[in-house]
Amino acid sequence: MKLTLRLWRQRSARDTGRFEQYQVADISPDMSFLEMLDSLNEQLCAERKEPVAFDHDCREGICGMCSLVINGLAHGSDRGVAACQLHMRRFKDGDMITIEPWRAKAFPIIKDLVVDRSAFDRIIQAGGYVSVDTGDAPEANTVPVPKPAAETAMDAAACIGCGACVAACPNASAMLFVAAKVSHLAKLPQGQEERRRRVRSMVEAMDREGFGNCTNHFECMAACPKSIHVTFIARLNREYLKASTRRSSEDIH
């Protein structure tokens, strides 16, 4: 296939950035989207031009690094996959493909298609963990977890923290990400000790980072490569309300 790539180039965070067009040829339909970008970079290097910077790691839909907006859609047109799992057979010979980085105030662009997602790390550092000393790891079957709770926790734990939910949301909200992390631990016995403090700390950290509010567009769920459901946002709201009510009651007494 021959393709025209309308691609965002930005030398640094201080640069204003602009779209540039490139032509690529001999693209196999079996290539992944990132392999197509590899081909472009090989071409640019052969022409002694600067290659395009983009994030990638596992290329198996696990790490969440491949943060690309492809033709206006986070991770591209396929549902439930990351950009590394999107294949060139989804495009036609002669297509023009527009490729951009995530667009969000809390995800500043570092270079080209690479954005700084350390805001997510700071939200996790605020409470997305279990810190109580449990001693040696117990044998799994000695801590009973009801099957529905375990399945719900695993559904939430599937979140890979890629940021597609933020990129797809018109408000650049991180509610789906935070909801998945809070819900995961809230459903397990190990997460109960810090349950109230966790949700307050993580929501407050999210607000400090400058993410927008959720207004129920559901674009986050549509873009999520792991199909995290928006019902987790409702769970997050309940958890936060309970924790805030408890803290208000404690302050009064």
Image: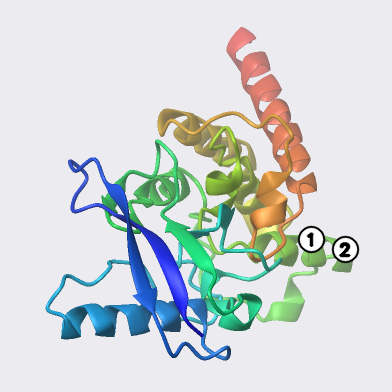
Residue 78 left/right relative to 21: right
Q: Which residue is mark 2?
A: 148
Residue at x 70%, y 39% (from the top left corner): 236
Between 190 and 203, the residue placed more toward the observer is 203
Task: Give me the disc on residue 152.
Answer: 1
Q: Callout 2 environment at 10 Å: few (<14), some (14 to 19), or many (20+)? A: few
Q: Position of residue 190 (x, y in %)?
A: 64, 59
Q: Is residue 155 above or below residue 17?
A: below
The outermost residue toward the left is 48
Between 72 and 96, the residue placed more toward the observer is 96
Task: Give me the disc on residue 38.
Answer: none
In the rendered structure, which amino acid carries the disc numbered 1?
A: Thr
Residue at x 74%, y 76% (from the top left corner): 142
Is residue 68 something one can see in this rendering?
Answer: no
Q: Position of residue 49 (x, y in %)?
A: 15, 73
Query: Residue 36 falls in which quadrant of the image?
Result: bottom left
Q: Position of residue 71 (x, y in %)?
A: 55, 57
Q: Is residue 85 above or below residue 50?
A: below
Residue at x 41%, y 54% (from the top left corner): 101
Asked if the residues shown at circle 2 and circle 1 are in contact, with their CB atoms under 8 angstroms apart, the answer is: yes
Q: Position of residue 147 (x, y in %)?
A: 87, 68
Residue 218 left/right relative to 44: right
Between 172 and 142, the residue placed more toward the observer is 172
Q: Callout 1 environment at 10 Å: few (<14), some (14 to 19), or many (20+)? A: some
